[in-house]
Amino acid sequence: MKTGGKLMKLAISDEGFIFDPETGNSYTTNPTGLLILRMLKEGKGEEEIVKALTEEFGAEEEEARRDLYDFLEQLRAYGLVEGV
Amino acid sequence: MARRYEKPVIHRLHMGHTNKFGFASPYGAKVRKSIDGVPIEELVSRFGSPLFVFSERRLRQKFREVKNAFTLRYPHVEFSWSYKTNYLDAIVAILHSEGATAEVVSEFEYEKARRMGIPGPKIIYNGPYKPIDSLRVAVSEGARINIDTFEEIADLERVADEVGKRPKVAIRVNMDTGIYPRWSRFGFNYESGQAWDAVKRIALGGKLDLIGLHCHMGTFILKPEAYEIETRKLVELAYRIEDEFGFKIEYIDVGGGFPSRNRLKGIYLPPEVAVPPIEEYAERITTALLNNLRPGDYPLLILESGRAIVDEAGFLITTVHATKRLPDGRRGYVLDAGVNVLFTAFWYHFNVEVDREVSGAAEPCVLYGPLCMNIDVVEDRAHLPPLPRGTRLILSPVGAYNVTQWMQFIRYRPAVVLIGENGEVDLIREAEDISDIVSRERVPERLKPKS
């Protein structure tokens, strides 16, 4: 999954508060979103993230995958990840 | 598994912006797990989704509330049920059992009212197009006919000769009561003298008994003052007619148009604030009557209220089928019910409730229907937490117009159920199937598929 360098620059707190030092924008996310962001920063791929969502939160695999795509679309809409 | 799953969301924080009006709680949505004590899931498992649900208790309660507002203030009142608002047999049966007569605007509605056991004299026949065959039936059966055009006067005189009866008629009048838009296309205009010409024409013919005056100013009228002006003008016209032509005006029909507690698009305030209580309308109308009527004269006041009575008794249960993220960042939901069954979605923002607690912050979203049509938007600014597939939404109020104006377009129309005052749930209209749609079609022999 190509996420670009933007993500690496974000400051992410344990509570899900996110600060973008480039733009000064800040965001808030929930525990599942936080997990996804952390894993993306670590360079983890789709399969690993879906697996983590099902293991840590008990999500159904299909729903977790669907929601991961949706979350990536949200990140893209905010310009926090690049490309398709 | 340590933590509860919640759909991942990220929201940008806007510093320095506070919401002036907190129209929705940021966490969670309004939850409705049942209607009149019957669980949503039970209704769906028995009758499917989408599903229209009517509450007999709410309907009777509202009818009595509206009726009492008028009967407490004026001694001689008739409520005539506006069939076009909702003509499901079970619904009109409830209203007739409460004492409502029938207000119909087509031969179809006339037939439906007769079928429900309403005799001709208890029917008011309105509308701009009344085919002459339907006038023959209405006159023979003694219905009251509110005339809309000069041609209709001529038609009724012809029918009077044929049937050998003097039709009991009123003229519909349109007028300036200070509201916009003015419904000037129905009936005869007051200010221009057209209404007076119609009276003269009826007197000249000598075959019709002019016994009433009718006006229906518009719909969802939020200005009670307009009704006061309307009523005063009708009373003045009535006495002018009585004095100059000797017709006794026995009824003043002020129509309907009272709003329900629905959020009209373009109106910022919530309905609890924007919609005046029915008592205010009743007060205006009855005050105008009592201030302008001659001593001892109490003509029948007729009300054709529809929406204000039935809208809040109706709910639609619909199911989230799919989710998509729109390019502008909003979430979109695909529901199994759209504008095909929710005609009023074009002008209302419905009250949207969810059948379960859903965790997560509410976000702006769009509710789309199932049609393959761009216009199929049920709600373009809902505020809901991320909803899993299969979540039921309960939309309300939807009791007025939707089950009469719904379209059989692409999909079958869903079932309609009634929750009785006794708590029983009855199917009052079956869901359609293909036989409902093709039963009247005919394929020429040469085009029939070869089997």
Image (cartoon, rainbow, N blue to C red):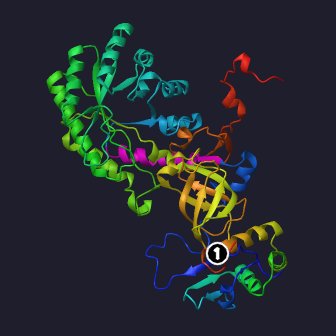
Residue B55 on the magenta segment? yes
Coordinates of residue B139 in the picture (x, y in percent): 40, 17
Question: Which residue is depicted at the point 30% across and 19% down?
Answer: B153
Q: Main secondary structure of the magenta part?
A: helix
Q: Which residues are magenta?
A: B51-73
- Residue A80 versus residue A39: which sits nearer the camera? A80
Q: Is residue B63 visible?
A: no
| Chain under disc 1 | A
Coordinates of residue B110 in the picture (x, y in percent): 48, 25
Question: Which residue is depicted at the point 73% across and 70% down?
Answer: A69
Taking the image as shown, residue B254 lies to the left or right of residue B245, namely right
Please identify the quadrant where the N terminus of chain B is shown.
Answer: bottom right
Vertical placement of A66 versus B247: above or below?
A: below
Q: Quadrant of residue B367?
A: bottom right
Q: Quadrant of residue A42?
A: bottom right
Coordinates of residue B91 in the picture (x, y in percent): 56, 38
- Residue B380 versus residue B115: which sits nearer the camera? B380
Vertical placement of B366 versus B291: above or below?
A: below
Taking the image as shown, residue B276 lies to the left or right of residue B295, namely right
Label 1 element class? helix
Taking the image as shown, residue B17 lies to the left or right of residue B74, namely right
User: Quick one: label 1, few (<14), some, or many (20+) residues within 10 Å?
Assistant: some
Please name the amino acid that badge 1 sits on.
Arg
Residue marked by disc 1: A76
Please identify the quadrant where the C terminus of chain B is shown.
Answer: top right
Coordinates of residue B258 in the picture (x, y in percent): 39, 47
